[in-house]
Amino acid sequence: MASFLIASPLIVEEIRKEISQEDGVVLQDILHTVELGDYNKDEGLELLGDLRSSRQKRRNYKDKQEVMNMLLGGDENTGSQHVMDALDKIKEVTSPRSYQYRIQNSNKNIVSYYNLNK
């Protein structure tokens, strides 16, 4: 446990750097390619795959960051409660995910667009 506590600031900083890399450099490169690029359908699908991969990496880092914050946090939880909360979070992040669209009927529009352009 002592080794973990000693290394934890380095772990947290590395996670923060990885999130920043995915949010900044990778995402911006992909978005600029979408905006300015000249690509065919196959290249567009490859680009979409790159975007998905980047977002999944980012989510993984964000989950790790949240677990670390729970283990190291200074909120109202103490001692074993931090560990219990972290274990609950680990269970949560390993279960299937879904997304609640912010724009009403977005899911239908996206699915319709996808089906029209197959």
Image (cartoon, rainbow, N blue to C red):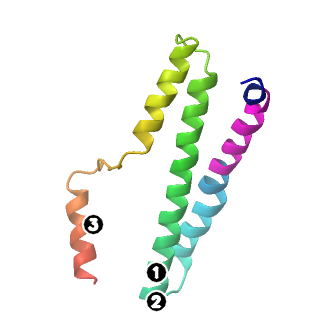
Residue at 67% of width from left, 50% of height from top? 18
Residue type, numbered disc 1: Gly
- Residue 54 part of the magenta segment: no
- Residue corresponding to mark 1: 44
Disc number for residue 8: none
- Based on the displayed image, in which of its 4 quarters is residue 1 positioned? top right
- Amino acid type assigned to the residue bearing label 2 in the image: Asn
Badge 2 density bin: few <14, some 14–19, many ≥20, Cα 10 Å: few
The x, y position of residue 45, in whole percent, is 44, 79
Q: Distance between the Cα atoms at labels 3 and 1?
A: 16 Å
Q: Estimate how packed mark 3 is, as few (under 14), some (14 to 19) or many (20 or more) residues with alpha carbons within 10 Å.
A: few
Secondary structure type for disc 1: helix
Q: Which residues are magenta?
A: 6-19
49 versus 63 height, above or below: below
Q: In terms of secondary structure, where does tag 2 sit?
A: loop
Task: Give residue 71's position: percent from left, percent from top.
Answer: 60, 25
The residue where tag 3 is placed is 110
Q: Is residue 17 magenta?
A: yes
